[in-house]
Image (cartoon, rainbow, N blue to C red):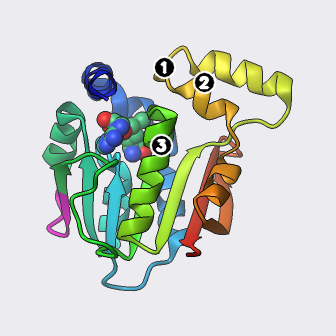
Amino acid sequence: MDDYHSYTNRLFRKWAPFYDLFTMPLSRVRDKVVDLVDAEKDSKILDVCTGTGKQSFAFGKRGYSVIGIDLSEDMLKIAKRKNRYENVRFMIANAGNIPFEDNYFDVSCISFGLHDMPHDIRERVLDELKRVSKKIVIIDYNIPKNRLHRVLHVSIASLYESKYYKDFAERDLKELLRQHNLKVIKETFGLIDFVRILVCENVR
Ligand SMILES: C[S@@+](CC[C@H](N)C(=O)[O-])C[C@H]1O[C@@H](n2cnc3c(N)ncnc32)[C@H](O)[C@@H]1O
């Protein structure tokens, strides 16, 4: 656990200054997520693994009340510096141990976070997301189904992604969601089909 936390902090300390530039092509995906979720006015949104806060801001500019949490102080420093919204707040917190009571949020969201953690933590994070909200949104790479394409995709992504990425890519995300009683109620793709957006409901 300590190894994972310090690895994550070290990795994102290096990434923080370039992260927004590198992820600029995802800008329209952020708005697409908000449209797909279509949360009611005044909804409370949790954005875990918020990083530099881009998905939080996409919700925030539509008037939702948003809390973004992350382990990395360096990423959060950038999110806080950019924040122009009174309805968006950021705090250091672990997605595997979310410091809010059950069902505190209407929607919880994890964008490009599940691939940056070991599998046992990934499972814990899904349970935490379910605990704090009924609706859960997952945004992550759409891993190619074709074996050759997948091998190519993983080889390229592994050049810049965390050491946990390969494990994420080898697993079936939808199967993982099923195991956690998360029912996919909406699904779409972004950046052609590079990104997958899944809106899920807790079915238990
Ligand atoms: C690839 S970035 C994604 C940032 C942002 N959500 C986005 O879509 O651009 C992954 C983020 O997850 C954070 N992270 C990884 N494990 C975490 C955990 N257990 N709790 C909170 N944040 C975590 C990292 O610090 C990093 O900022």
Q: Position of residue 119 (x, y in %)?
A: 51, 36
From the image, tell me which residue sits under label 2: 166
How far apart marks 3 and 1 lie (CA) works out to 14 Å
Identify the secondary structure beneath mark 2. Answer: helix
CA–CA distance in space, label 2 to label 3: 14 Å
Distance, label 1 to label 2, CA atoms, is 7 Å
Report the amino acid beneath label 1: Lys
Q: Is mark 2 within 8 Å of ligand 1?
A: no
Quarter for ligand 1?
Answer: top left
x 54%, y 51%: residue:
139
- Mark drawn on residue 163: 1
- Judge from the rendering whether residue 8 lies leftward or rightward of residue 122; answer left or right: left
Mark 2 / mark 3, whichever is N-terminal: 3
Residue shown at 49% from the left, 47% from the top: 123
Q: Which residue is mark 3?
A: 122
Of the residues shown, which amino acid type is indicated by label 3?
Arg
Q: Which residues are magenta?
A: 83-89
Mark 1 vs ligand 1: CB under 8 Å? no
Rendered residue at 69%/24% (across/down) = 153
Q: Residues within 10 Å of mark 3 (few under 14, many from 20)?
A: some
Q: Position of residue 68 (x, y in %)?
A: 27, 55
Quadrant the N terminus occupies: top left
- Whichever of callouts 3 and 1 sits on the residue coming sooner in the sequence is 3
User: What's the residue type where badge 2 is placed?
Assistant: Lys
Q: Please, what is the dominant secondary structure of the magenta stretch? A: loop
- Residue 22: quadrant of the picture: top left
> SS class of the residue under badge 1?
loop
Q: Are marks 1 and 2 in contact (CB under 8 Å)?
A: yes
